[in-house]
Amino acid sequence: MSTFSPWQQRAFDQTVAALDAGRLGHGLLICGPAGLGKREVALALADHVLAQGDATHATRTRQLIAAGTHP
């Protein structure tokens, strides 16, 4: 269970569904006022994408993200 607000959860779920169905474009713009939770949604989406790739690369990338050192 996530700690997203309802509007964040809806945006996350819709984006994951589009991604999994191959209907997500080449880019995604996440915008809104400060403090809305954009970073949390973006990081959760990145984690979802990483979970579908090479496990070794994903583990290292997750470590970099958690340390705040991933570009």
Image (cartoon, rainbow, N blue to C red):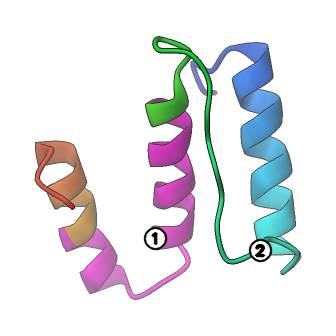
If the image is split into quadrants, where does the N terminus sit? top right
Question: Magenta residues, as a range?
Answer: 40-60
Residue in the foreground of this view, choosing between 70 and 49? 70
- Which residue is drawn at the image coordinates 33% and 74% (left, top)? 58
Residue in the foreground of this view, choosing between 35 and 50? 35
If the image is split into quadrants, where does the C terminus sit? bottom left
Residue 70 in percent (x, y) is at 19, 59
Q: Is residue 70 left or right of residue 7?
A: left
Per the rendering, the mark at residue 50 is: 1
* Amino acid beneath label 2: Gly
Per the rendering, the mark at residue 14 is: none
- Which residue is drawn at the image coordinates 48% and 58% (left, top)? 46
- Which residue is drawn at the image coordinates 55% and 77% (left, top)? 52
The answer to whether marks 2 and 1 mark residues whose Cβ atoms lie closer than 8 Å is no
Residue 30 in percent (x, y) is at 62, 42
What secondary structure characterizes most of the magenta part?
helix
Look at the numbered disc 1 and give the secondary structure of its residue.
helix
Disc 2 residue crowd, few under 14, some 14–19, many 20+, Cα 10 Å: few
**Above or below, 51 relative to 48:** below
